[in-house]
Amino acid sequence: ANFQPGQFAQFDLSKTALPSPDAVPVPEELRDACSRKILLRRPFSFAEVTPDGDKTFAELLYCVVGPATVRMTTLSAGDRIDVIGPLGRGYRIPEGKKTVLLLGGGMGTPPLQHLAQSLTARDTGINVVSLSGAKTAEALPFEGRLDEISQTLGFSVPEFAKYGIESLIATDDGSAGYHGLVTDCLAEWLEKTDLAFDNIIICACGPEPMLAGVAQIAAEKNIDCQVCMERRMACGIGLCQSCAVECKVAGSNETIYKMCCQDGPVFDA
């Protein structure tokens, strides 16, 4: 229940089994990989965390991409797995910010959904706007239906609309919402807004090229920006140093390496 949005947990999936071919067919491109043993824990952030008495319910959104996530499809109510968390540093909204822009690309939306839940639950009076992008409408990681009416009203994503948050959609092929990259949608939104940039903070999560584009836009307009990075994290506590992220030193051309699991996964852009 003490999870900060953007923090993560390490899941031990070594004892989970492969699904029955009849129940959940393994994608052909993953069949060889799925025969491997799961030795290392897998990091996941949560889309929603809700305390309920002495229990905590957490919503997890994942994409089947390898042997661990294939095995996760076999989990059902009552199954037990070992989880370590919360780990790392999450999003931190500085005092005085009046608008938070949540910018998600592809499967990068879960920690932003959690941040939306956190900001609205605290009734801080902060205005929150969500911008989500993917290659196609089908690739958007949302369960709710996107219709023309809801997009016109600016509440097109139920996962954010339930918090009263305006949301914008961008797809590379134009199959839903803005036709183009979500970073271009962000740049257009910033050009149209009358809000003072020093009252805005951008919180982003998604593919690194997208995060680099967001950071560049934020730097050009002198807007505070935090990005949530993704790395393979073997231990989750900074010991194995397998998740190094190269970071610039402020006011210098030098760079240093920080651990994504310990210094991040949320970094100042």
Image (cartoon, rainbow, N blue to C red):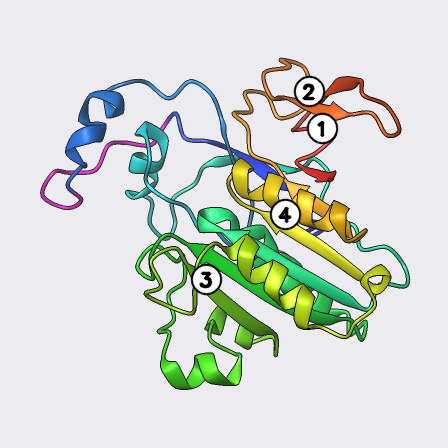
User: What's the residue at 47%, 21% (across, down)?
Assistant: 40
Span colored in magenta: 15-24
Are the residues flagged by discs 1 and 2 in contact, CB closer than 8 Å?
A: yes
Marks 3 and 2, Cα distance to the nearest angstrom?
Answer: 36 Å
Up-down: is 222 above or below 266?
Answer: below
Choose the circle earlier in sequence order: 1 or 4: 4
Left or right: 14 in relation to 215:
left
**Three-letter amino acid code of the residue under disc 4:** Val
User: What's the residue at 20%, 21% (across, down)?
Assistant: 32
Closest to the camera, between mark 1 and mark 4, is 4
Q: Is residue 57 visible?
A: no
Are the residues flagged by discs 4 and 2 in contact, CB closer than 8 Å?
A: no
| Residue 262, numbered label | 1
**Three-letter amino acid code of the residue under disc 2:** Gly
Mark 4: which secondary structure?
A: helix
Up-down: is 124 above or below 237?
Answer: below
Q: Nearer the viewer, residue 91 or 105?
A: 105
Choose the circle earlier in sequence order: 3 or 2: 3
- Few, some or many residues within 10 Å of mark 3 (<14, 14–19, 20+): many
Marks 4 and 3, Cα distance to the nearest angstrom?
Answer: 14 Å
Which residue does the numbered mark 2 point to in the structure image?
A: 238
Marks 1 and 4, Cα distance to the nearest angstrom?
Answer: 23 Å
**Three-letter amino acid code of the residue under disc 3:** Ala
- Seen as rendered, the residue at the extreme top is 240
Choose the circle earlier in sequence order: 4 or 2: 4
- Few, some or many residues within 10 Å of mark 1 (<14, 14–19, 20+): some
- Few, some or many residues within 10 Å of mark 4 (<14, 14–19, 20+): many
Q: Is residue 82 visible?
A: yes
Which residue does the numbered mark 4 point to in the structure image?
A: 214
Choose the circle earlier in sequence order: 1 or 2: 2
Marks 4 and 2, Cα distance to the nearest angstrom?
Answer: 27 Å
